[in-house]
Image (tube, rainbow, N blue to C red):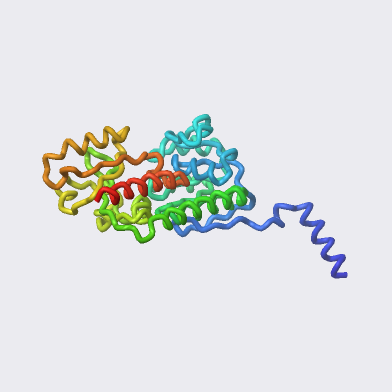
């Protein structure tokens, strides 16, 4: 009789398969619980970094729309657009009938996120702040999109890359770093930014790690007072030569004379995606060059 009961229950599951498949449940970076009855097949990304993460998690084919400036990978440029990260066209998103919207906690406006939820859309909100968050978010997206195997492969590759850089930098002399994300006004990052995590990984010390704002504006006097050994970055400089020229122009100031300024490709490090490993490799190489010259 038990065997017969199992057959009956199995038959019912085949007839009503949706009710027999376990829901997909995740807790996002707001602490909100999202429940999907099936993997998402129409996904809308609300930031270029999220577009990259969805592709990296193996779900690029399921993207229904992306924001402007989603330029990586190349396939993203052909997708419909729904505004930009700071101003989302909610009606456009709704018209696309997505079964999942992926938002960026600190990059999208809270009002946009709230409006999309009021419209009845399913949202997961992510905030990858540390290097360890990249594989975590990849796995989360993979679970929601039904691409867990591809996401796991990408997550493990990222973890291995981070571990390799950590091993190469272990025991090396600390280098005091000023990281520039914009030159006019002069902007940097504090200790809660993923780039700070990269600097630490490479054996560097961010001279503005203790500031309260994530991306504070600082003065040249502030930089001089903290005595950096190198300037890295250059979000507003299109080349290594341009960044170097911007800082050579400040060489009249005693504390900045002969201070090297080394370019890091912004796209490789300012988006919280697997490509941040490329930026990390550049940072580690730059810090090694400073050590060799000191």
Residue 293 on image: x %, y %: 26, 48
Q: At 80% from the left edge and 59% from the top edge, which residue is drawn?
A: 10
Q: At 46% from the left edge and 51% from the top edge, which residue is drawn?
A: 125
Q: How many marks?
A: 0
Q: Is residue 218 left or right of residue 87?
A: left
Q: Is residue 272 left or right of residue 157?
A: left
Residue 214 on image: x %, y %: 30, 51
Residue 142 on image: x %, y %: 57, 50
Query: Which quadrant of the view contains residue 132?
Result: bottom left
Tell which of 98 and 219 is nearer to you.
219
Tell which of 61 and 131 is nearer to you.
131
* Quarter of the rendering occupied by the N terminus: bottom right
Residue 100 on image: x %, y %: 55, 46
Q: Residue furthest bottom?
A: 1
Q: At 50% from the left edge and 49% from the top edge, which residue is drawn?
A: 123
Tell which of 196 and 253 is nearer to you.
253
Q: At 27% from the left edge and 33% from the top edge, which residue is drawn?
A: 242
Residue 146 in the image: above or below residue 5: above
């Amino acid at each position: 009789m038990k065997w017969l009961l199992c057959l009956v229950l199995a038959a019912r599951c085949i007839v009503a398969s949706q009710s027999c498949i376990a829901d997909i449940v995740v807790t996002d970076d707001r602490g909100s619980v999202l429940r999907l009855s099936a993997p998402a097949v129409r996904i809308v990304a609300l930031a270029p970094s999220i577009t990259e993460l969805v592709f990296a998690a193996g779900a690029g084919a399921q993207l229904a729309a992306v924001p402007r400036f989603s330029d990586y990978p190349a396939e993203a440029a052909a997708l419909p657009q729904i505004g930009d990260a700071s101003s989302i066209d909610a009606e456009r998103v709704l018209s696309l009938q997505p079964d999942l919207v992926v938002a960026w906690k600190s990059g999208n406006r809270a009002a946009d996120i709230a409006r999309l939820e009021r419209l009845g859309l399913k949202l997961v909100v992510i905030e990858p702040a540390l290097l360890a968050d990249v594989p975590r978010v990849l796995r989360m997206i993979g679970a929601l999109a039904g691409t867990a195997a591809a996401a796991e492969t990408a997550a493990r590759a990222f973890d291995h890359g981070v571990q390799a850089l950590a091993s190469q930098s272990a025991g090396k002399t600390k280098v005091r770093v000023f990281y520039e994300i914009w030159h006019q006004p002069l902007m940097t990052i504090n200790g809660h930014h993923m780039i700070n995590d990269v600097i630490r990984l490479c054996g560097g010390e961010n001279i503005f790690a203790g500031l309260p704002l994530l991306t504070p504006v600082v003065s040249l006097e502030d930089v001089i007072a903290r005595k950096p050994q190198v300037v890295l970055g250059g979000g507003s400089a299109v080349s290594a030569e341009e960044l170097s020229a911007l800082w050579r122009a400040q060489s009249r100031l005693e504390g900045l004379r002969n201070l090297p300024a080394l370019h890091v490709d912004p796209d490789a490090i300012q988006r919280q995606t697997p490509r941040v490993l490329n930026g990390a490799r550049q940072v580690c190489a730059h810090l090694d060059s400073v050590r060799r010259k000191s």
